[in-house]
Image: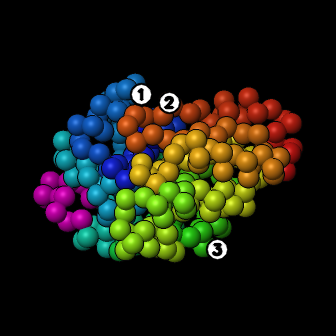
């Protein structure tokens, strides 16, 4: 992840000769700087896939697309909702939730979520050459049956753990904002993320990255403790980390994680 939180979200997925960004919630300059930190140039990105219109997921999509000629994939309703970002020189490509589409060696599988946006989706991204699936779900009001079905069987999960319930109630947000965050169209709490992650456990799941943490209503140590305890109780010993708002995570090699886990981990569940 190039960064994740209420101020910006962007995830790099790369396999073989193809590299894409899922969301582009930082300025064009910041996106380029964070990519360079990971050893890539902006021109190496083959596409941007937008999940919904909120600024922390779209801020740099227009300028990055214009500056580097990068195609931007989004739903028709999302394009209309963030039309001010685009000036007519971008390569905009419309996709439909529930209909997979291919970008080079990657297949993107978008699915509807419960979030307060006009047409919110989350995605799984499958490496066609290695048959490895990454689930990216950073804005989930609640884990519906459809979301659960779409994320089942992923080799790696990027899952939001937005807030601690106590810190949300005692934090700086007014009651109306607290209600929105905690609603079934807002964001998952640490405990909700822990329960959902446990439901998604299966023998091939090698890693979980917790994302979209609130800086005002959560702490990385709290999210790791709550989610980690739930997964350990289920017998899972995989890779678990938290994404930062301010800096990219290191590149995670899913194949290498699987080798490190070994056959004992893969037979636990």
For residue 11, say whether it is visible: yes
Seen at 12% across and 58% down, the residue is 87
Report if the CB atoms under discs 2 and 1 are less than 8 Å apart.
Answer: yes
Q: Quadrant of residue 129?
A: top right
Q: Residue at label 2? A: 250
Q: Position of residue 195 (x, y in %)?
A: 69, 61
- Label 1 crowd (10 A; few <14 / some 14-19 / many >=20): some
| Residue 38: numbered disc | 1
Q: CA distance from mark 2 to mark 3?
A: 32 Å
Seen at 29% across and 31% down, the residue is 33
Q: Which residue extends farthest front? A: 170
- Side of 88 relative to 167 (left or right): left
The prevailing secondary structure element of the residues shown in magenta is loop
| Residue 145: numbered disc | 3
Q: CA distance from mark 2 to mark 1?
A: 7 Å
Seen at 18% across and 41% down, the residue is 67
């Amino acid at each position: 992840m190039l960064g994740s939180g209420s101020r910006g979200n962007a995830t790099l997925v790369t396999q073989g000769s193809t590299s894409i960004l899922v969301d582009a919630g930082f300025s064009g300059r910041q996106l380029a700087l964070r990519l360079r930190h990971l050893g890539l140039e902006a021109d190496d990105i083959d596409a941007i896939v937008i999940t919904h219109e909120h600024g922390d997921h779209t801020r740099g999509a227009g300028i990055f697309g214009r500056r580097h000629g990068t195609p931007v994939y989004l739903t028709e309703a999302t394009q209309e909702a963030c039309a001010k970002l685009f000036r007519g020189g971008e390569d905009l490509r419309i996709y439909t939730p529930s209909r997979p589409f291919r970008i080079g060696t990657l297949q993107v599988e978008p699915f509807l979520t419960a979030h307060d946006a006009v047409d919110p989706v989350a995605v799984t991204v499958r490496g066609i050459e290695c048959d490895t699936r990454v689930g990216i779900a950073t804005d989930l009001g609640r884990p519906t049956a459809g979301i659960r079905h779409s994320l089942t069987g992923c080799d790696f999960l990027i899952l939001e753990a937005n807030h601690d319930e106590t810190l949300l109630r005692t934090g700086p947000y007014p009651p109306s904002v607290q209600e929105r965050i905690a609603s079934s169209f807002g964001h998952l709490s640490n405990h909700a993320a822990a329960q959902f992650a446990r439901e998604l456990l299966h023998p091939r799941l090698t890693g979980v990255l917790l994302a979209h943490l609130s800086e005002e209503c959560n702490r990385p140590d709290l999210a790791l403790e709550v989610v980690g305890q739930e997964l350990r109780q289920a017998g899972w010993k995989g890779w678990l980390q938290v994404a930062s708002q301010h800096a990219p995570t290191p590149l995670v090699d899913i194949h290498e994680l699987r080798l490190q886990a070994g056959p004992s981990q893969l037979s636990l569940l």
